[in-house]
Image: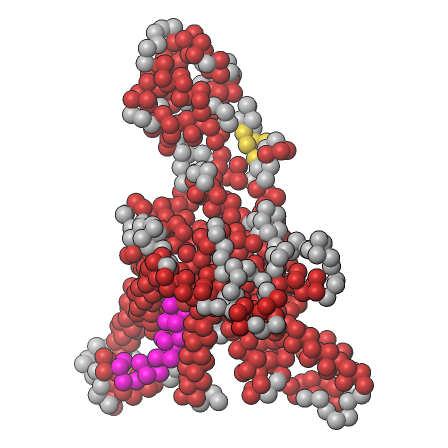
Amino acid sequence: MLPSYAGPLETTWYYTFRILCGLILVFLIAPILVIIPLSFNAEPYFSFTPGMLSFEPDAFSMRWYEDILNNKQWVHSAKNSIIIAFFATILATTLGTLAALGLSRPEMPYRGIIMGMLISPMIVPLIISAAGMYFFYSEVGLTQTYLGIILAHAALGTPFVVITVTATLTGFDQSLIRAANNLGASPTYTFFKVTMPLITPGMISGGLFAFITSFDEVVAVLFLSGFEQRTIPRQMWAGIREQISPTILAVATILVLISVALLATIELLRRRNDRLRGIV
Amino acid sequence: MSEQVMAAAGGGAVLAADGTPLKERLQKTLRRRKLVAAGLVLPLGAFVFITFMFPIVLMLFRSIDNPVINENMPLTAAILEHWDGQDIPGEEVFAALAADLAQARETKEIGRVATRMNFEYSGVRSVFTSTARKAKNMKAPFKDALIKADEKWGEREMWVTLQRMSKPYTSSQYLAALDMRYDIDNNIVMQDEDRQIYVMIFGRTLWISFLVSALCLLLGYPVAYLLATLPLKYSNLLMIMVLLPFWTSLLVRTTSWIVLLQTNGVLNDIFVWLHLIDDEGRIQMIYNQMGTVIAMTHILLPFMVLPLYSVMKTIPPSYMRAALSLGANPVTAYVRVYAPQTVPGIGAGSLLVFILSIGYYITPALVGGRTGQMISNFIAFHMQKSLNWGLAAALGGILLVGVLILYWAYSKIVGVDNMKLG
């Protein structure tokens, strides 16, 4: 905060800095917000019409949203996206959580190298992953199948689960488990009654990361999917490249709202986790 | 118990309750725990290996694998192996070639052979397909018959290329990926000036990644500082402005930039409205390198802010206050006391942004136009359009090695454990 004894130079710098930061935050957020009003454009343009700027009701319409609902392809791709993301998330969360539990044990051998390998799907350029998967999956008959895309997306999503769950487990007091064992609980019972409640927030936020990774992923889908498995991002990709229409902005607006919901969930979980672990 | 202690004091081993030496028991337990830990990691390890790593290794193998000629023209390949590469080979090689061509046409593999050769020596596709059509009815002397069918068979370059391509493994894809090739005497030389492209593209990819990282640092540093120094109540609110883009679909953000930057887009409209530019003088801000850089900076900025923020959060504000009260002016205090402590955050953020941007594909493909295309776009081109999979694999191999080196540096400097996600 600006102290009361600050000189004119300090005051100027203080406000300049604040304005600068404000502009950068506008740069971050404005591009996402600008598409929302444009998606209600009555005209098939990507820009504000004079009517919109003077707030004439006729200049706004829901026609692009109706377009989505009436278009079989969009509805079908929305279903695909949800199905694929759902199964990919379950797979990634289960495998990722188990691995994180193992990695957090002090006696885990070669921890650094293994962790590095498990995180690599997040680091390797998507085009390389997708190309590799394309050749291998077509050899075993997994291209143009839902299973193929689910496996690919699960692999791409696991690093997020591993990272978030290991983060929840750092500082996890191993003596809690010994205490439970001492008091006669079986390992399974200990897991569900002691470990699980502590790592649930990490699991859920990791799962949400995995979900959004799959929900947003297009490169692997471009290589692996057939027409039947088209997802929303794949449909948007085609839309942007071929016939760009404000329908895409309507879809984008819906996706932004989904992100807001996911972000809110993550934030709530993070705060709950901090509170449970006594950080705040 | 006391007897056991006595035994230990007397030189014997300490025993556990069941009579086995304690040391052995402990080792056994530790071994079991190690196995349990490894057992928990194993399912994911196996999954990632099968669905992700193994496919990539297999794909990279294509960059050196060269089976087409070797398998489909076995007779020619076997004889050419011993050819010295100086004079046009003799009748026996031509006879083998005629037989191989006829056979390849029979098995319908001639198309693949011709395509493979054409990648190495452009323009010879038709030489192979047309000669193969006539090969069946050719009679000795085959040398004259083949040269009559196409003059190219009388050229040394054709034979040198065929000899090189008939080996089961090749380095020519990697050479091509680095704008090099073999000349007629099998020396490695640079590609002709007008056919050099990939070194330039790799350079451009590095340049764009560097530019994006630098811009992210420039924009991310003040924001991270503000977030780290504001009271929690406000910083949590502003943090949402950083995290929302992070959670928003990549395609949505790329679409937004198309809407904003295109010549009839929102920004140009504002400029015209402000009379900064004429209606005719609208600025081309997208479908070029500028579009790629702006959109990528926006998309990757949260990856810079988050690590910077988490480092700055750990710097006690009392350090700055101490420096100021000891007489340093604010600039000196900042440069000497605060800034050095943020270096780990700068390193972590910049490396992460650089690693992520170097392999970017979607954004350059949609907003990059011609001058904003990066190496991933060329890999995709060879995967999907030209179908030169060997070259795609070689380009991918080089890109992957670069990324893995950076990743290794990242794990040494930052540690993969310290990766922060929101």
Please give the range of residues in magenta: A191-211
Residue reaching furthest to the left = B18
Percent from the top left, x then y, of residue A4?
75, 93
Residue reaching furthest to the right = A8
Residue at screen point 50% across, 55% down: A244
Q: Compared to B175, does B215 lie above or below? A: below
Q: Is residue B267 magenta?
A: no
Percent from the top left, x then y, of residue B84?
48, 18
Q: Is residue B48 left or right of residue A14?
A: left
Magenta stretch, main secondary structure class:
helix
Q: How many marks?
A: 0
Residue at screen point 66% across, 76% down: A21
Residue at screen point 56% across, 40% down: B178
Q: Is residue A199 magenta?
A: yes
Percent from the top left, x then y, of residue A102?
33, 71
Q: Compared to B91, does B230 lie above or below? A: below
Percent from the top left, x then y, of residue B41?
32, 66
Applied colour scheme: secondary structure
Q: Nearer the viewer, residue A231 or B214?
A: A231
Q: Nearer the viewer, residue A32 or B137?
A: A32
Residue at screen point 76% across, 78% down: B331
Residue B252 showing in the rendered view: no
Residue A14 showing in the rendered view: yes
Q: Compared to B273, does B233 lie above or below? A: below
Q: Is residue A172 left or right of residue B306?
A: left
Q: Is residue B313 left or right of residue B252?
A: right
The quarter of the picture where residue A11 lies is: bottom right
Q: Quadrant of the N terminus of chain B?
A: bottom left
The quarter of the picture where residue A27 lies is: bottom right
